[in-house]
Image: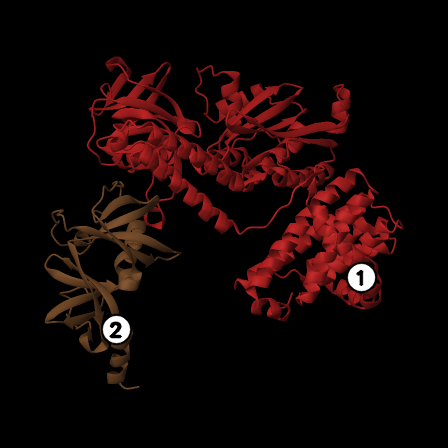
Amino acid sequence: MNAETATATATADLAGKYLTFALAEEEYGLPVLRVREIIKMMDITEVPQVPSHVKGVLNLRGKVIPVIDLRLKFAFAKGEVTSRTCIIVVEVALAASRVMMGIIVDHVSEVLNIVADEIEQTPPFGDRVCTDYMKGVAKVKGTVKILLDLDRVLGTDEAALRAA
Amino acid sequence: MTDNELAFLRDDPEMADLFLAEALDHLGTIEAALLALDERPGDVTLLNDIFRPFHTIKGNAGALGVTSVQEVAHRVENLLDLARSGRRTMGPADVDVVLRAVDVLTSMIRDVGARLSGQPGAELGPVAHALIESVDMLISGEAEAHVQSHATVSTPVAGAVAVEAPVSPVKAAATEPTRSEAAPENAGASRRGGEEITAIKVDTRKLDILVDAVGELIIVQSLIQEDPALANHVDQRLAGNLGHLKRITAGLQRSAMALRMVPIRQAFQKVSRIVRDLSRKADKSVELVLSGEDTELDRKVVEEITDPLMHMVRNSIDHAIEPVDVRKTAGKRPQARLALSAYHQGGHIVIEVADDGKGLDTEKIRARALERGLIAAGASPSVEEINALIFEPGFSTAEKVTEISGRGVGMDVVRRNIDALRGRIEITTEPGKGTTFFIRLPLTLAVLDGLVVGVGRERFVMPTTGVRESLRPTPAQVHNVQGAPRLVQVRDSLLPLVSLGELFGLPHEADPCKATVVVIEDAGSRVGLVVDALLGKQEVVIKSLGETFASVRGLAGGAILGDGRIGLILDAHGIVELERGVNRAAA
């Protein structure tokens, strides 16, 4: 297999339906199959002794789920809570189990069917940009959507928490 | 055991699970019947109760190709068959060997499970061969050689060679007459206490899902009940229907909780086994009296309480119960009595472990505690306080360390385990007459009685088992250390003050005299926890915070409060530890 076909396979694997959302003027996408539901901002119970981007826990119809503020996770400025702010409940694979987690985003945009042709592998940014969380970049209708690797974004919280 | 034996099971994981679960179940039945047989040798019903499950295990193992298990079961079956047909009486030596067989088979079955799940297997071949050898010796009438046969355990090769030859002829003979027995087995197993109870096996995960769902239902029900929109609404029919809904959900919750309950019998059975083995080893005569084996507890509690119970019984036999001649001189019954009972008391389960041994030597404990600095030189603790010192880590008054106990590890572990189950342990003792331990446990681990406390705008739930009292101190009771209030005087004792708000970095009332101090206790050490307010007492459903917060100390989980918000459940042990850590960091 030459380099070109390898790239083609990788982007073909990424093709599919994505839920896109906005975070500080940027557009992100995550695989729609991992999304359980989208809820409006709710009352979150803070948990002590955790990094600041871990907002706490919320009661999702009787289930206690952790909530992450994605803005703080990505070191953006703290966002104002508006009527469009919402929590996307996603399923994440952790070391030992699959769990539900909530992520706070500025607003959700739409569900997009992204085809392989629109996807490019994460370009080399050098060390100016941390690309660990990115699976790839999609150009749709003239805008760029950053496709997130959920397990890495949220999974690394585990490591951070344990180390703390 | 070889890996080829597992080829069939590997292909059919569902069948494998069923086989393993059933086999362990049968081994449990066998063990219970054996212990009963020890007291009533020659009881044919019991013999059948032992024989049939062995036969089933053998049959299943054979059909699934697990030949090593089949082989062991088969040999034991030979011995049992002799007894069943009246050609042999099951003496203590026979019971011993069959009990050993139960142990060996249990480890073999566990080993099969381990290997199937990809873990490295254990080498159980020599143990199995040694066992087969003992069984064969018994059968061939060398019962007296039994004791010496233990010596040959370490030479499995000799045993292995002797094993092969006589298998097939006996096998055919043994299998034939028992075929008809296999059918009524299920009917027999479900008959207990004369009453017909039919039971089905359910995957515990399904049960947990049901219990979770019911927990959510209860929460939603209370959310609706307490909804402000409804509170202002006066409508008789609506109020009536809501009341009805509440009763039904409460009933449903009770039934769902009951599903997780199992009789404590299983834990008691393990204890019977250990009493039997230990009393022989320690050369003491002990009669074990069980009562309330049908008392039901949360499955998890039964599992977790077994080890502490075994530890306590071991301690009793080793330390408390005197040898026969000492008992005779003291004018006591030569056979000691160890009573294990379980009963309900005020929303709790109480397990009593009572012996009629020599009782705790309070003077000796006091002397030892002084020596180890556990009691201050001038202090005059009460008898109860002194006796409670046996739960301190590393505390032992035994002059000699025996095989069974005396290393001073044990009672502290017992208390830690019981604490973890949110239970309490107490002692009453009378010199020369005996000692009784009372273990008080919650009925279930799924709900907890909590004190809801507020700090800033957050609310926390403190399990009531850890709470001793709460008070609002007067300025005279509070003492500053290095410029901050760090100590509170409660009657005679000075307790460290821990501000929950400070510990968790929340806005809080800094002056303890305007706040509330909740005195919590963990493993004997008490601290005064400063909170802004006491908000009430509530029964809450415990929810795990999940892996994400596994490393957070001082919290035991989350609970959904009446208004739908989550209150974090505090963990007394973690808070006491955190407090110490904070102090150490500050020093």
**Camera-side residue of B522 and B320:** B522
B59 relative to B298, above or below: below
Image position, residue B422 (x, y; %): 46, 33
Read off the residue under disc 2: A15
Task: Locate residue B471: give its quadrant.
Answer: top left
The quarter of the image holding the C terminus of chain B is top left
Q: Residues within 10 Å of mark 2 (few under 14, many from 20)?
A: some
The chain letter under disc 1 is B
Chain A as rendered: colour: brown
Disc 1 from disc 2: Cα separation? 62 Å
Looking at the rendered structure, the secondary structure element under dot 1 is: helix
The three-letter amino acid code for the residue at tag 2 is Ala
Above or below B534: residue B161: below
Side of B134 where A18 appears, left or right: left
Q: Are marks 1 and 2 on the same chain?
A: no
Counting other residues with Cα less than 10 Å from the Cα at mark 1, is it few (<14), some (14-19), or many (20 or more)?
some
Position of residue B449 measured from the top left corner of the image (x, y, whole percent) = 41, 30
